[in-house]
């Protein structure tokens, strides 16, 4: 392919914004009960654990569905793959309103949304590859991931206010309408790829998914990233899920827990912007991953031992910065290290193991506390896990090595 065949289109930003919009609404659908667990349990007449399961089902569904989602994205490309996720999220997100106070019907609709999630999240690096030049690819991936954090923050922060002002069914209806609108805009206006590729890499032949998965798990560098995602997202999902229980024995209330959780997400957004830009500019994926995980490891050790609010606020922000900023860098790094494996395959496997890590950490460490209920033993063990991850990341190689 000659340089004259390569062209960058301004419409790439329109496609990315449409994708970010549907991603934001998807995360709002996922997290919509997290900050009203007690109220939702009363409304649906179930235990709080069953309300928590409405969020956990997304992680469970991701594991089997990711293989189908990656295959469809690899075979039929970005717009078809992501479009399936958009349609499922829009339809089932809207149908939740008609469940009324029937918990089982709500759960069925929630599973429908959860099935759609891998089709969207596994499309992240394919969108970047289809539309963006190599000099912008990690930034595009970072922005896609930032939209997840924005959706989570909006869902956690505004849901209680909507429920207090009206009620739970109206909150569900509002989110369902948003999902329909964002989905319709994506289906109508998002294109699969530009008329000509943004780089020579975009036109290279790729292997089929089956062979691609085999190559992934024979690649020692991919396995290091695989382990990194398992522990990184597993630990982050545990802390965000248990944040109130973690800080309560240390003299903090639900408001403090919400602030700490928000600071972690804000740190993640800032980290994604900065580290993605540095990755695109300097192409030093390994070094940036080491820096991110080092920041996360130090932060978690300090959070483990600290009871001081200022330290907890500061290092919650830095923990989010470290863990979440590693995401887009690692996803694009995996694409580079595993060519010609399709982007959706490496993307899908890393996102899947991160979801699996979340399930394991959330379930396995439940109640792993001191006799007084302090999650100090869990946090200390998780800090050690991050330290081990930091060590193995040194065995990665830069693309040019």
Image: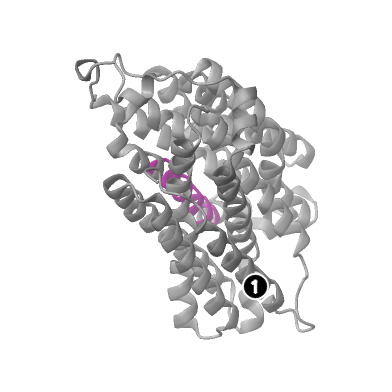
Residue sitting at x 49%, y 82%? 309
Q: Between 397 and 249, which is closer to the camera in this rendering?
A: 397
Q: Quadrant of the N terminus?
A: top left
Q: Say whether residue 95 is visible.
A: no
Q: Which range of residues does the magenta coloring cover?
A: 143-160
Say left or right for 91 vs 378: left
Q: Position of residue 116 (x, y in %)?
A: 61, 30
Q: Where is residue 345 in the image (x, y as percent from the top left)?
A: 57, 31
Above or below, 262 relative to 139: below
Q: Say whether residue 228 is visible.
A: yes
Q: Between 320 and 85, which is closer to the camera in this rendering?
A: 320
Q: Between 99 and 298, which is closer to the camera in this rendering?
A: 298
Residue sitting at x 45%, y 68%? 295
Quadrant assignment, res 214: top right
> Does the stretch in magenta take in 218?
no
* Furthest residue in direction front, as rendered: 401
Residue sitting at x 76%, y 81%? 370
Say left or right for 266 vs 171: left
- Disc 1: which residue: 379
Crowding near pointer 1: few (<14 within 10 Å), some, many (20+)? many
Residue sitting at x 77%, y 51%? 50
Q: What element carries label 1?
A: helix
How many discs mark residues in the rendered view? Answer: 1
Above or below, 164 relative to 377: above
């Amino acid at each position: 392919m000659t340089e004259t065949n390569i062209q960058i289109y301004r419409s790439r930003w329109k496609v990315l914004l449409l994708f970010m919009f549907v991603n934001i609404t998807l995360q709002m659908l996922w997290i919509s009960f997290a900050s009203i667990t007690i109220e939702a349990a009363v409304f649906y007449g179930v235990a709080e654990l069953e309300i928590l399961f409405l969020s956990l089902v997304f992680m469970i569904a991701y594991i089997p569905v990711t293989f189908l989602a990656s295959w469809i994205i690899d075979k039929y490309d970005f717009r078809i793959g992501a479009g399936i996720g958009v349609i499922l999220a829009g339809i089932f997100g809207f149908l939740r309103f008609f469940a009324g106070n029937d918990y089982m019907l709500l759960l069925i609709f929630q599973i429908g949304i959860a099935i759609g999630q891998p089709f969207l999240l596994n499309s992240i690096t394919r969108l970047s590859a289809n539309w963006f030049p190599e000099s912008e690819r990690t930034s595009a991936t970072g922005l896609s991931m930032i939209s997840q954090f924005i959706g989570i923050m909006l869902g956690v922060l505004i849901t209680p206010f909507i429920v207090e002002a009206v009620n739970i069914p109206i909150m569900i209806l509002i989110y369902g309408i948003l999902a329909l609108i964002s989905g319709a805009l994506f289906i109508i206006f998002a294109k699969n790829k530009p008329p000509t590729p943004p780089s020579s890499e975009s036109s290279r032949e790729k292997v089929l998914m089956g062979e691609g998965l085999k190559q992934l798990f024979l690649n020692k560098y991919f396995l290091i990233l695989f382990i990194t995602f398992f522990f990184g997202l597993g630990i982050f999902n545990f802390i965000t899920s248990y944040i109130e229980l973690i800080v309560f024995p240390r003299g903090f209330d639900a408001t403090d827990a919400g602030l700490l959780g928000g600071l972690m997400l804000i740190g993640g957004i800032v980290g994604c912007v900065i580290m993605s830009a540095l990755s695109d500019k300097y192409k030093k994926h390994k070094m940036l991953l080491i820096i991110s995980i080092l920041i996360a490891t130090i932060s978690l050790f300090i959070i483990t031992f600290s009871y001081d609010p200022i330290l907890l606020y500061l290092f919650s922000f830095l923990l989010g910065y470290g863990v979440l900023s590693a995401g887009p860098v690692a996803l694009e790094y995996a694409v580079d290290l595993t060519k010609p494996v399709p982007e959706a395959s490496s993307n899908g496997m890393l996102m899947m193991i991160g979801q699996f890590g979340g399930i394991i950490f959330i379930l396995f460490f439940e109640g792993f506390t001191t006799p007084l209920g302090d999650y100090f033993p869990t946090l200390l063990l998780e800090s050690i896990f991050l330290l081990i991850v930091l060590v193995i990341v040194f065995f990665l190689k830069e693309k040019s090595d």
